[in-house]
Image: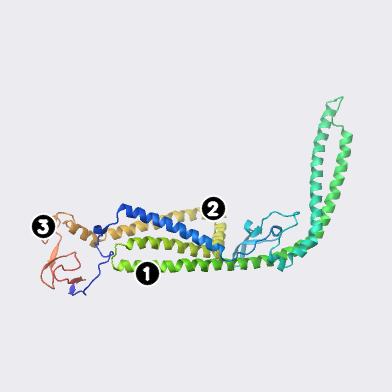
Amino acid sequence: MFWSKPKLNIEVKDKAPGYEETERSTPKAGYILLFAMFIAAVFFGWRALDDLHNVPQKPQSLSYCASSFIEYRWGDVGGFIYDFSPAPLDFYDVRPKTLSNTDCVFSPLEVKHGIPAVFEKRKDRDLKLRNLQLELNQVINNIGDNERQYNLGLTEKIAEEQKRLYPIPEIQQKLESLRQKEVILETEIDKLRAELRPLDDELKALYRKVADDYRREQRWYEFKIFLLEAIFVFPFFFLVFWWYRRLLAKNSPYTIIFTVLIAVASVLVLRVILTWFWGLFLASVIEAIWNFIKSFALLRSLVFYGGMVLSIAVFGGAVYWLQKKIFDPQRVAMRRIRQKQCPSCQVSLDLGGNYCPNCGRKLREQCPSCAKERWLDLEFCPSCQAKKVS
């Protein structure tokens, strides 16, 4: 080891080994108030970010008529589409329809691609088809009722009832008439469906373009929200962090206030970043991976087992890091010397001199700079300020 003169005006930082801030500890009431400040700041900051969603103009939802013709891609990862499903409800205009099931309030995007004109072409046929389907359902229900009556009539005939409630010839005649009507209705329905098929295919093709335009507008809307949130949150975070570093360097007792403010700013920053990336691609990636994992039972078990191991590593590692800091040999030595105990065995130092009388550990040595005694475990000589450099 050699010795060197330290520079003057050395700042004592709280991360120095053995540092204890017992003379300026925050009272319990202060911690309660800081916790209340954290909850209130996060709550109002979160609500402020929520309200920013109303600043940019949101893309107008598509009409409810789109629900029958649009294919919404939930999972499009690297060009691989793993699932087709209906769009979420807020994708459509769910306001009550005015006149019939074919009367919808079309959005500007639908008007742009000529959707209303195609709906007008199919409107009469679609209305007729719906009426025929209702009529067919009624006929099928009547057939079921008459078949039940026919079976009861057979039961009466077998029992040789004199006064029968269900005359078989009349029921057979009704059944024959209903089945003929059923065939006629099904033929007309098939004909109408064949006439509507080209128009439906045209609407599906047009709605694919509408959906692409809608997604582009939605992404642009989300990007505007991200920029607004970033303008509100990021400067606040960097300002708080800068002020925290400044107070920390001065070993200020008010550093704890800005520690809480950093926690508030960090929560809001994480919300902004994760929300943006979640809508951009993260949700699709996670859903694609999870759908793949669900198809293999063993893989699912391994994922949950990995989650258990990861949670142990994260939380256990955090506790290990804290304990390692607290029980650092230099910190332990400093605490025990302050209590007049041997840094190794904690025997009272009142019983010893340069060596511990219990374990024989060397406690003091001669300072090479001033030749006075100094503690072996202390970094600076208390007489000449010479720093021990190993």
Q: Which mark is residue 300?
A: none
Q: Left or right: where does residue 379 sit relative to residue 34?
A: left
The answer to whether residue 88 is visible is no
Image coords of residue 133 (percent x, y): 79, 50
Query: Toward which corner of the image does residue 103 lie, by quadrant?
Result: bottom right
Mark 3–mark 1 Cα distance, whole angstroms, equals 48 Å
Instruction: Quadrant for the N terminus, please.
Output: bottom left
Q: At x 64% / y 63%, what residue is drawn? A: 60
Visual colour scheme? rainbow
As helix, strand or loop, the secondary structure at mark 2 comes to: helix
Mark 2–mark 3 Cα distance, whole angstroms, equals 67 Å
In this figure, which residue is indicated by the disc labeled 1? 242
Q: Which mark is residue 297?
A: 2
First in sequence, mark 3 or 1: give its number: 1
Q: Which mark is residue 352?
A: 3
Callout 1, which amino acid?
Trp
As helix, strand or loop, the secondary structure at mark 3 comes to: loop
Q: Left or right: where does residue 180 sit relative to residue 206?
A: right
Callout 3, which amino acid?
Gly
Image coords of residue 151 (percent x, y): 81, 34
How many C-alpha atoms fall within 10 Å of the one at disc 3: few (<14), some, or many (≥20)?
A: some
